[in-house]
Each structure stands twice: as C-alpha cells, then as structure tokens.
Amino acid sequence: MKKKDPARSGGDAEETLLFVSLPDSFHHHVGDMEIDPEIPLPVEPDTDPSEWDSESLTWEGIVAGMLKVLARNPDHTHGDYYRRFVQEARPEIFTELSETGIIAARNENFAVAEEIFLALSGLDPDRVEGPANLAITYEQRADSLDRVGRDDDAAAVREQALEVYRDLLTREEIPVDLRLNAGMFLLKIYHYESAEAQLEQYIDEGEDEDKKAHAQRVLSEIRSRNLLDELFKEAYDFIKIGDEERGIERIRTFIEKNPEVWNAWFLLGWGLRRLRRFEDAAAAFQQALSLGADNADTLNELAICELELGLFDESRVHLEQALKVEPDNTKIMSNFGVLELRRDDPLEARRFFETVLELEPEDTVAREYLDIINGPRSD
C-alpha cells in the first residue's frame, strides 16, 4: 500500500488529508460494492501526516476522509465513488449524522454542525435535509454572534444562510415546511418580497393549521405596514454595507409615506446610531417603541444611545426591560457591564462580564473589559 502526498480536501477546509493508493492486486468489497484499487482513498490521519503508516488505516478513517472531501468539494473527480463507498460502508450514516449535527447546533458547537451538514449535503445532493439543517445552523450561529455584539460577523453568516436557502428554493420539490422557515428567515433580513412569496406558498400548501395561521398573520403585517416598498429594502441594504447616509435618506422617504411603521423607525435609529448621532437615534427608537416595537433589540439599541448621551438611569431602565424579554442575551448583559463602568461601579460591572463569559466563553469584548477592570496581572 502506497501513501500519496498530503492534499487539501477542497474548498476552504483546513484539515490535511492523505490520499492512499491501493496495490493493483487488492480485491475487496464494501457492502455490495467492489473497491477500485485505481481510485485513491482519502484518509484523515490522527497523527502527523509524516508519521502515518498503513497500519493506521481503518474503515472509519476512510469514511471520515471521504466525508471531508464531499463536504468541501462535492464535485470532486471521484465524488460519486466516495458517495457510494460511504453509503455501502455505513448505510445508516445519514440519519446518524443528522441527529449528531442537530445536537451540536443546539449546543452551539456550530463548527461541528456546519461540517456535518456540509458533508451530508455532499453525500446525497438530492436530499434537502443536509442543506436545510445547514441553513438553520447558520441562522443560529448568526443569532449567537448578535448576542455578543459581533454584528458584522452575524451579517456575514446570514449571507451564508441566504445562499443556502436560495439554492434550496430553486429545487423543483422541497418540503413545504422549508418554505415557512425560508419565509421567516427572509423576513428577518428584510427581504420582504421574497418572504411574502414563500409564506403565500406555505399557506397554499401547508397542512398545519396553527402554522398557517401564524404565516397568515405575518403576511398580513407585511402588507398592512407596506413593508414591500423597495425603499425599505434599499435602506436596509445601504446601512448594512456601511453607506448609512444613503440608507437614512431612503428610510426617511419611506417614513414620509408610512409614518406608522415601527420597523422603519428602528431602521432609521440603527443607521443614525452607527453614525454616532445618538440623540437623533434615540428619538427614532423611542418612536419605534411608541408604535409597538417592544422587543429586546429596540430596547437595547435605545439603551446604548442613552448610555452614550450620559442618561444612565434611562439606559438602566431600558436594559432591564430588554433582559426581561431575552434573559440570556449576552449582548445586553455586556451593555449593562459598560453602564456600570460608566457609573464607576467596577464590582458590579465585573459581575455582568463574568456572567457573559459563563454563557459565551469566547466573548472577546467581555474578556477585554474584565482585563481592564482587573488590571495588569503579575507573573
């Protein structure tokens, strides 16, 4: 048995795989499939590739290597061969990995979940479960990034989710519940026209009466608030890419026609806050609240503006209200910590930042503030 040079499995995978050549005399079956010795087998080594030898070769290692290839390079030259090999070697692998991936995403092990669902997408491209769960994983990851204030990273991950949904929605047959998921996601990123189309189709084809009623309520809200207006989407897109001035111009024009739409006032406040025009932004968020936007995001954004304006008591009130809506939102907790620092109460601030790190150990903002509070450490 010969060992080939280490090779990348394709895409942006960081893991190095070994591609192992079998001797021409090798004759063996996996399930009903005869192994072709001319096709190299990808192996994920559990040691330094330079120290790997053929005695370390296992069926599990081969299957793991093939899944790596299919995850990052589903159009690989030997992709079809690897697919059949994996399915013959592990007939129940799709179900087993799906369950593992869902649990990983639920536990916020997003990198593991992503790798699993990419592998399942490559393993059986005709099935929707892999990419559908991948899109949901990206949504959950983006929400997690939002909670720690990494807004730009969250937006980038939502773009990944959008790309997956777009691909799924071009397929001829997809589960009707996927249209509801897609519609709610598109609504969240302000793609109202596309959201409307998916929700309409779900209402026509869905069988769950409670879900259909919810979809109808959302659809009615989109239409009653005139959220299909192109100005609204343009405003969001401009602000998202950092062109706040043009975004604000668009959303002000929209508000002139639709002054009762709280979403528009929130969008205006978001753009103004990003420009550090905190007084104007606070007024916009207050208007959104008066029109019914009693959600954690609006309350948190308003509290940030009040914090920057030195209105500490008002900021505290709105942060407390936001935490009542979303008790585990670490972004709100971090803002509470910043507020306590501004109020010269480092002990209380430390309590908030330590709580954030208990929930989100990788939160760099909370870690940096704790380092400031604790001061330089002596060796």
Image: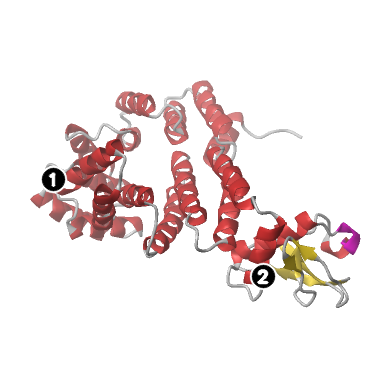
The amino acid type of the residue labelled 1 equals: Ser
> Which one is earlier in the sequence, the residue at label 2 or at label 1?
2
Determine which quarter of the picture holds residue 191. Answer: bottom left
The residue labelled by disc 2 is 81
- Within 10 Å of disc 2 (Cα), the crowding (few <14, some 14-19, many 20+) is some
Left or right position of 164 against 89: left
**Picture residue at 13% right of the left edge, 49% below the top:** 255
The amino acid type of the residue labelled 2 equals: Tyr
Left or right position of 41 against 325: right
Tell us which disc is closer to us: 2 or 1. 2
Q: Is residue 276 above or below residue 209?
A: below
Residue 329 shows in the view: yes
Quadrant where the image shows the C terminus: top right
Q: Is residue 218 above or below residue 374?
A: below
Q: Is residue 55 magenta?
A: yes
Q: Where is residue 236 drawn, in percent x and y?
A: 28, 55
Query: Circle 1 sits in a helix, a strand or a loop, which is it?
Result: helix
Left or right position of 37 against 149: right
Residue 12 shows in the view: no
Q: Where is residue 63 drawn, in percent x and y?
A: 72, 58
**Picture residue at 27% right of the left edge, 46% below the top:** 277
Q: Looking at the rendered structure, which numbered label has been put on residue 224?
A: 1
The reply to whether callout 2 and callout 1 are in contact (CB within 8 Å) is: no
Q: Is residue 335 above or below residue 164?
A: above
Q: 177 or 205: nearer the eye?
A: 205
**Which span is picked out in magenta?**
52-56
Quadrant where the image shows the N terminus: bottom right
Q: 177 or 32: nearer the eye?
A: 32
